[in-house]
Image (cartoon, rainbow, N blue to C red):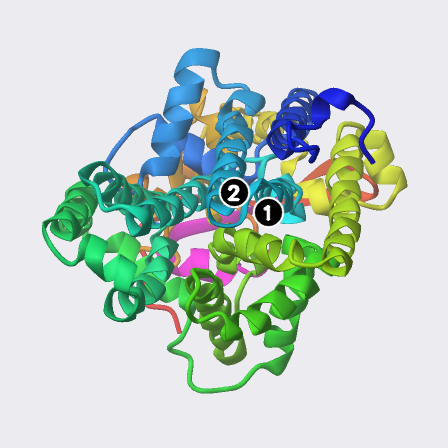
Amino acid sequence: MIADPSDINRAGRPNYRRWTMALIGGLLLFRLLILALNPAGLHGDEAQYWAWAQDPAFGYYSKPPLIAWVIWATTAIFGDAEWAVRLASPFLHTATAILAFMTASRLYGDKAGFFASALYILMPGVALSASLISTDAALLLFVALFIYAWVRLRERASWRWALILGAAFGLGMLAKYAMVYVLPAFTVALMLDRSTRRALLGLKGLLAALIGAAILMPNMIWNARHDFATLVHTTDNANLGGGMQLNPGELAEFIFGQLGVFGPLTFILLLIALWAARKRSGNFEIWLAMLALTPLLVICVQALISRANANWAGAAYASGTVLLAAWAVRSEIKTKCLRAGLIINLLLCVIPGLVLTSPELVDQLGFANAVKRQRAWPETVEAIRAKYEAGNFEAVAVDNRLIFYDLVYYGLPDTAPLYMWRFEPRLNNHAELTRALPEDERSVLIISYYANYADYFARDFDTLTPMGDIEIALGGGKTRRLYSYAASGYRGPVFRD
């Protein structure tokens, strides 16, 4: 329904460009407000990225460096409060929604552009991602920019768009190595799509490749100097070396998880649009479908033979939004179905955001478990600091990466040298790479996340004495329990089975 004559363009149709800007602009303001009001502390992963930002580099153990550079930029201007650490995320997603509009509008008209941007900005997964800081926000931006540059190059080959295409790929790789998911569809298009081949099989394609390689090269050099730590971690994270045991339950969990990432109804509609795209081989939709299917199918296989998190296929949705919008605007019934899906997604975006601003409401609704890892870190630091000072220790060591970085962010190293105890000789995280516990005779307060690690500590230290549990109330009936030990004479890690 159109309530304002100014929302009608000269042809008597809705002004979809104005609607798009109103929607994504309104959601940006809403998300910035929620960011400022959200009392939740940093999750361990967010605290880790913040810690990396204190030492900008071309690489880190588990991720490429762009996430740290982004946090460095926002915190350099606004300080180190939680909202400032997360500040870039809603802006990155807003930029991606604008690119979704630009791509769909150029290919299929402004109506498709509006629905593509609405699909993206109202994705439940994007709503969650916009409330924290993660690698996915920047990744999706550069996937969307890559697609738009590809569309422009198919229209008219130019040096500018070749440069942007290469830069988008390189920067996307610096955000997350999942950027490689664009390559299969793009490579096939270079062979089979005349417009892509004409634009990029030549000097312009060489320029794009050189720009992408030049941007990525410093990260590859960093990896080479650190035993290819990030690449090894990425392979380990896939967990494909445990034998060919099929896990249909993991596959089902991943697929159902996409209902929560893309939207309950909109994901079903996307599957229909993907199936319909097989009949449009002469249209760019076939390449949009391939761009979306590649990460979805790869992660489905990984879930079946190992495990997978729901967000690992997130790169699919930069193209999936455009594909679904193009499919939906071709008939009124499809458009009505899409509108219904977007209304559901809007509720899933707005209601949880409002709830999260009230810890009391979170607890009353039974959602405390979802936010327990972000609560009571200042209190946890004070409890550890008191135990450290009472025992005349010389250092604190922890056995969990997420605990380590939350303690760093919330200030334990201001009064106590903080180190990471290594479970085994090989490195498993960036804290072990940069802050591994030294092998010497110093007296160490061990803070353990795990209840059953005493035997491991006893192997690694000359002396070990239990010092009691630390319990921190988190609200909603949840408690953080940490186990403490006094130890000395650290001999270093030994091989574990």
Residue toward you, 131 or 27:
27
Q: Which residues are magenta?
A: 451-469
Residue toward you, 225 or 264:
264
For the point 36% across and 58% down, the residue is 182
For the point 65% across and 53% down, the residue is 329
Residue marked by disc 2: 105
Q: In the rendered view, tell whether residue 191 sits above or below residue 43.
A: below
Disc 1 crowd rating (10 Å Cα; few below 14, some 14-19, many 20+) is many
Residue marked by disc 1: 112
At mark 2, the secondary structure is helix
Using residue 427 as the reference point, say whether residue 307 is left or right of it: right
**The image quarter in which residue 195 lies:** bottom left
Is residue 394 something that shows in the picture?
A: no
User: Residue 158, image x and y in percent?
Assistant: 21, 41
Amino acid beneath label 1? Ala
Q: In the rendered view, tell whether residue 391 sits above or below residue 225.
A: above
Q: In the rendered view, tell whether residue 87 sits above or below residue 287.
A: above
